[in-house]
Amino acid sequence: MTTKTGVANAGNLIMTGVLLMLLGDLLFALNDAMGKWLVASFAVGQVLVIRSIGAFIVLGPMILRQGPMALFRVEQKGLQFIRVFMATCDVALFYAAVAYLPLADVMTFYMAGPIYIAALSHFFLGEKIGWRRWLAVLIGFAGVVIALRPSMAMLSLPSLFGLAGSLAFALSLVMSRYLRSTSDTTLVTWQTIAALITGIVLSVGHWQSATLIDWSGMLLLGIVASCAHLLITRSLKLAPASLLAPLQYTLLLWAIVLGYLFFNDIPDAQIIIGAAIIVVAGLFIFHRKNLKETVPVEAVPPDGH
């Protein structure tokens, strides 16, 4: 009886983890759609500033509970700086790209993050990758090229913003692996501070007056993103990452739905084909990783615009 109760409790925890992951993904998709709506009217820097202030509404109590001085007791400060820099580039480039491109297009570039991580882990983390996963990496890159559209559009700034942002995202997560003993509160706080500083610099000369609804939307952007991050972090503690990782691809589905509902964006055939190739390649990498060992948390796709 005790064994059955233990199995039932474990099953409930896993189901809770799955539901938290799906809810976190939905919140991130809403966050991305809100960001696209806001950067259509306001400078990226201004949105970053107010978004960061909103994030501190959630982070403030966590910082107090942890102790403010804990923010300065971090390992490998050089790598911490690189991670914060990459995370800031990720957020800024995402908003710069989504200001001009459909939400589904930009999310397609970001869905390739786990594929970049697989390749980068081989060179920077010394992880062995077999020929099957290398083949999946190459196929995933082919999907990115298709999504970029092999033409002069590949050289458009918004597309390059999306591609560079997804690479910055992947590099920030590779750095997270080195720094996994640092608390989530510390990691998120420093990247939020960096986003705030970057936003202040970028908003000089571009600050605009806004309505109460606009200010509230920018603050809500930070609150929603922080809550989504916390939900996904908690889900990964309740259920195996190998089970949860594929669920993150629901972000792409939400991006298509919300893009159509709010912006009347309909993905073209190349985006759909490229996205399908990227998702299949990413799922195969997760599958092969799961055969060898548990999928690390940092291999999970985007969890924090």
Image (cartoon, rainbow, N blue to C red):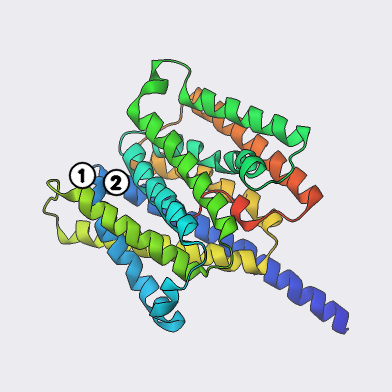
Can you give x and y, in whole percent of width and height, for residue 235 in the image?
Answer: 60, 65
Can you give x and y, in whole percent of width and height, for residue 292 in the image?
Answer: 80, 49
Name which residue lies at 45% across and 37% down.
Answer: 104
Read off the residue under disc 2.
37
The reply, left or right, for residue 141 in relation to residue 94 is right
109 vs 228: above or below: above
Name which residue lies at 19% across and 49% down.
Answer: 203
Which quadrant of the figure has residue 297?
A: bottom right
For residue 61, which numbered disc appears in the image? none
Choose between 266 and 272: the one closer to the eye.
Answer: 272
Helix, strand or loop at label 2? It is helix
Determine crowd level at label 2: few under 14, some 14-19, many 20+ residues with C-alpha closer than 10 A: some
The reply, left or right, for residue 171 in relation to residue 207 is right
252 vs 230: above or below: above
The reply, left or right, for residue 149 in relation to residue 2 is left
Determine crowd level at label 1: few under 14, some 14-19, many 20+ residues with C-alpha closer than 10 A: few
Q: Quadrant of the N terminus?
A: bottom right
Name which residue lies at 36% across and 61% down.
Answer: 192
Which quadrant of the figure has residue 103?
A: top left
Name which residue lies at 25% across and 57% down.
Answer: 49
Helix, strand or loop at label 1? It is loop
Q: Are marks 1 and 2 in contact (CB under 8 Å)?
A: yes
Amino acid on which the number 2 mark rests in the picture: Trp
For residue 41, which numbered disc appears in the image? 1
Choose between 183 and 248: the one closer to the eye.
Answer: 183
Can you give x and y, in whole percent of width and height, for residue 16 in the image?
Answer: 63, 68
Residue 304 in view (yes/no): no
In three-dimensional space, the C-alpha distance between marks 1 and 2, rounded to whole angstroms, equals 7 Å
Residue 72 in view (yes/no): yes
238 vs 46: above or below: below
Amino acid on which the number 1 mark rests in the picture: Ser
